[in-house]
Image (spheres, rainbow, N blue to C red):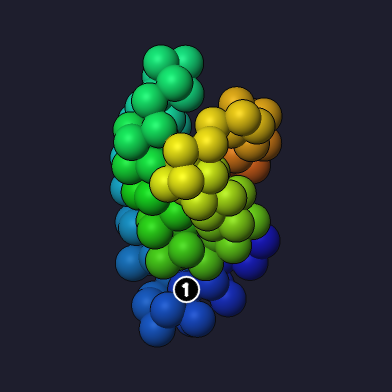
Amino acid sequence: MNIGELAENLGLEEEEYLELFELFVETSMSDMENLQTAIDEENAEKVAMASHSLKGASGNLGFMELFEVAKKINDEAREGRLDGTSELAQILKEKFNIIASLIQK
C-alpha cells in the first residue's frame, strides 16, 4: 500500500492523509467491536449501521478491499440476512488489522 499515492488520489498532503488514517484506525476499532456485538446479538439493524460506517470510512480513504467486505456485510444485513456475516466480519477484521499495523510502524 502506497500512502503517498492514496493521499494524492484524495488531493491531500501525505501528513494530512496520515492524520485521517490514524483517526480511521481509532474510530474503526470501535465500529469493529460494535459490528461483532451486533452479529453476536443477531441484530441486523445494528450490523447494517456498523458495517455502513466501516464501508464509508474505508471507501473514503481508498481502502477498497475493506470497503468491499464491509459492503457485502451491509448488503446482507439490510436484507435481514446474517448467515455468513460472522465469517465476513472475520475477514474484515483481518484486513483491518493489516492496515492498522501500517500506522504503528
Q: Residue at x 65, y 32 (%)?
A: 84
Q: Is residue 85 left or right of residue 61?
A: right
Q: Amino acid at mark 1?
A: Ala
Give the quadrant of residue 82: top right
Q: Is residue 90 above or below residue 2?
A: above
| Residue sitting farthest toward the top | 41
Placement of the N terminus among the 4 image quadrants: bottom right
Where residue 94 sits: x, y (%)?
65, 34
The C terminus lies in which quarter of the figure? top right
x, y percentage for residue 51? Answer: 43, 43
Spot the residue most to the front.
80
Q: Which residue is mark 1?
A: 7
Q: Dot 1: what SS?
A: helix
32 vs 40: above or below: below
Residue at left offset 64%, top offset 42%: 95
Q: Looking at the picture, tell me which residue is in the foreground, 58 or 37.
A: 37
